Every structure is written in structure tokens, then in C-alpha cells.
Image (tube, rainbow, N blue to C red):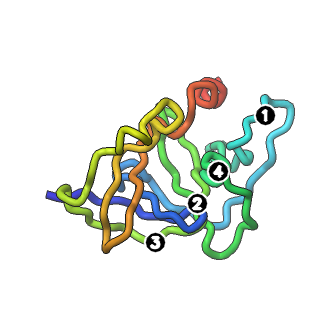
Amino acid sequence: MSTKQTVFRVNGEEYGLDIMDVSTVEKDLKIIKLSNTPVFKNVKGKTNLRGEEIPVYSLRRKFGYEDKEVDDETRYLITNVNGKNIAIEVDNVKGINDIQLSDIYEVPSIIKCNRTSYVKSIADVDDSLVVILDTNNILDKEETKALQA
């Protein structure tokens, strides 16, 4: 048995999202900075994607890394988080990996806490670790409430 993961990089580290959680991968989105709204450090702004305004969320900011200039490799994973479409900005997309369930491990208890609830599991892929994320826990409670408002 296996699972298909969209594998991407943020600051040189590899992460995965279940392919069923990613509706599309986009490039070159026009991001509009938000004004007159509560400031959330991880939200870069919003974009209009096929007639729908969706927030653009930075995993670099979420993980405590500096912003990086958007380049030819930057991609946006369009996913649904708790009923709301968002664009997750990542440094680049490596591809779709078919990961054997036997290569997926539980998150070590030393890493598990409220602030890391977005980490679903860890996979060993070609002798490197891929952190598999849980889409419904990427946003914290305040971010989820604000984006639904």
C-alpha cells in the first residue's frame, strides 16, 4: 500500500501534502497586500484565482524563516483548509511521490505539541526525510477564524 504526496521544499527542507488535498499547483499569482484587516504574520495577502478571492499563506513565515523573493521556482499549492480555499506559497515543488506506507512513521513525541499539530507524519523517501503536513491544522485557531470571517 502507498500514498501519493505532493512533495515541495521550504528553506531547503522537504514537505508533503496528500495529493487529494491539493486541487492545483499555480505559478505567478498576483498577490494583493491586505489593508484594513487584522494583521496575520503568515498571510502575505490575497489573490484572485478564477474569480475567487483566496488568501495567500506563507509556510516560510509559519516555520520562522525569512521571506524570499518570488522566483521561477515559487509555487502556490491550492488547498482547502477547514472549508476555505487558500494558496500556500512554497519555494518549489519537487513532484508527486508514491510513498510506501511502510516508509511513513509517526511523529516523535518530542516534536508533538499544539504549535506543531500541522505535522501529520514523517516519511523516509530516497534516504531523505519528508515531513507530511495535515492541511486542516496548518492554520492556527485565530488564523482559521479570521479567514472564515
Packing grade of label 2 (10 A; few <14, some 14-19, many >=20) is: many
Q: Secondary structure at mark 1?
A: loop
Q: Would residue 97 be found to the left or right of residue 55 on screen?
A: left
Taking the image as shown, residue 100 lies to the left or right of residue 31, namely: left
- Residue found at x 36% / y 56%: 19
Is residue 69 visible in this depiction of the protein?
A: yes
Which residue has dot 3 on it?
A: 94
Q: Are marks 4 and 2 in contact (CB under 8 Å)?
A: no
Check residue 81 in the rendering and tell me which mark sits there, or answer none. Answer: none
Seen at 34% across and 48% down, the residue is: 121
Q: CA distance from mark 4 to mark 2?
A: 7 Å
Image coordinates of residue 41 in percent, x first then y, are 73, 40
SS at mark 2 in the image: strand
Q: Secondary structure at mark 4?
A: strand
Q: Local crowd at mark 3 within 10 Å, few (<14), some, or many (≥20)?
A: some
Q: Earlier in the sequence, mark 4 or mark 3?
A: 4
Q: Position of residue 73 (x, y in %)?
A: 61, 73
Q: Residues within 10 Å of mark 4 (few under 14, many from 20)?
A: many
Q: Are marks 1 and 3 in contact (CB under 8 Å)?
A: no
Name the residue carrying label 4. 58
Residue lying at the far right of the rendered structure:
36
Estimate the spatial distance between the alpha carbons at disc 2 and disc 3, rounded to whole Å: 11 Å
Q: Is tag 1's residue or tag 2's residue first in the polypeptide sequence?
A: 1
User: Contact (CB < 8 A) between labels 4 and 3?
Assistant: no
Residue at screen point 63% across, 25% down: 142
State the residue in front, 30 or 72.
72
- For residue 39, the mark is 1
Type of amino acid under label 4: Ser
N-terminal of the pair, mark 4 or mark 2, is 4
The answer to which image quadrant residue 141 occupies is top right
Residue with the mark numbered 2? 90
